[in-house]
Amino acid sequence: MTDAAELRRRTAELLAAHPPATTDRLDFLRARFDAGLAWVHYPEGLGGLGAPRSLQAVVDADLAAEGAPDNDPRRIGIGLGMAAPTILAYGTEEQKRRYLRPLWTGEEVWCQLFSEPGAGSDLAALGTRAVREDGGDWVVNGQKVWTSSAHVARWAILIARTDPDVPKHRGITYFLCDMTDPGIEVRPLRQITGEAEFNEVFITDVRIPDSRRLGDVGDGWKVAQTTLNNERVAIGGMRLPREGGMIGPVARTWRERPELRTHDLHQRLLRLWVEAEAARLTAERLRQQLVAGQPGPEGAGMKLAFARLNQEISGLEVELRGEEGLLYDDWTMRRPELVDFVGRDAGYRYLRSKGNSIEGGTTEVLLNIVAERVLGLPPEPRTDKDVAWKDLAR
């Protein structure tokens, strides 16, 4: 079993062989991956050493202390948090070795082609079709929407309907899609913030080799659950310091601007500060639970808390700032590579947080998941579970 002392020794060897001050950033990241220090709980040869997940912090701390570059995780969050664990769980050895290294180093950005105009909350109702030609390539046609990073992505995780004659959850297959292939068209979706970090993606006669299928034909819903569970943990369970995230700017304004304070705002700030800290510690506990296995439906609860807190905290910040809170710094149409909640002003945080209860699973759907899979409450009646997808009303 690889322990903390062994990881420190390997980290020291990496730093000696590739001094951060004189080594090209990408070369250092590749060397780190090859040394098994990228994500230490992954298998050897795939960026890890089969060590406990909790020991990743040991490596990260030693590297940070020496000024080593990171892989800019916010920019490649979909690849790290969603694509990588799914490829690890269901990919062939060839797929793992082809995709995981450039994914982790950030050489290849990933996006997620799941939601559709008619299948957002009810994702299993998706209508994008993949038809196989004589046992060879798959030909895919359809439309996806709310696709973060599609404008910069090299690869996508894609689910498509391969059998319309069975119930909706059973006729889906999971693919890895090359975003540079002919037939892929990415269009920006301008949001209330003025930016277009999201996109809609049109897929027209795109050919995907069967070698880029992940999991068995028709087993895509099962594979997608691994992606979705990891997505919710990535959104709601991110590691933050105390007063990290949205609560930080509000607390800072409160301390620096005593003239803005009122008794009512004080009471609300205290309540939200405590809730944010409780959520932060719960997220830490959830990450510790991951050491024992794959994420479960608990991530849905964390994502619910994340969305609600962000919206309440940003609303409080706008009220605290009074007339200043109504200002907005820049309506320029941009297509950013990441969401920067703390790097913009209060108006941006207020507007952008409205999307938190939609992205990564709507609040309504996640409440059902928590009720049924965490609390064990009776499921809602569903009349479409045993009906062929082609026969569903649309």
Image (spheres, grey):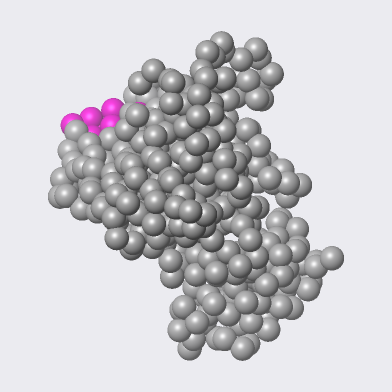
Whole-percent x, y for residue 71 in the image: 48, 67
Where 265 falls versus 236 (above or below)? above
Residue 146 placement: quadrant = top left
Residue 372 placement: quadrant = top right
Whole-percent x, y for residue 200 in the image: 28, 44
Image quadrant in which the C terminus is located: top left
Tell me which residue sits at (49%, 73%) in the image: 69
Asked whether 174 or 84 is in front, the reply is 174
Where 197 falls versus 102 (above or below)? above
Is residue 26 magenta-colored?
Answer: no
Horizontal relation, residue 269 to residue 166: left or right: left
Where 6 falls versus 386 (above or below)? below
Is residue 324 magenta-colored?
Answer: yes
Asked whether 333 or 226 is in front, the reply is 226
Tell me which residue sits at (46%, 79%) in the image: 25
Tell me which residue sits at (45%, 84%) in the image: 24
Image quadrant in which the N terminus is located: bottom right
Q: Is the stretch drawn in magenta largely helix, strand or loop?
A: helix
Numbered range of the magenta stretch: 316-325
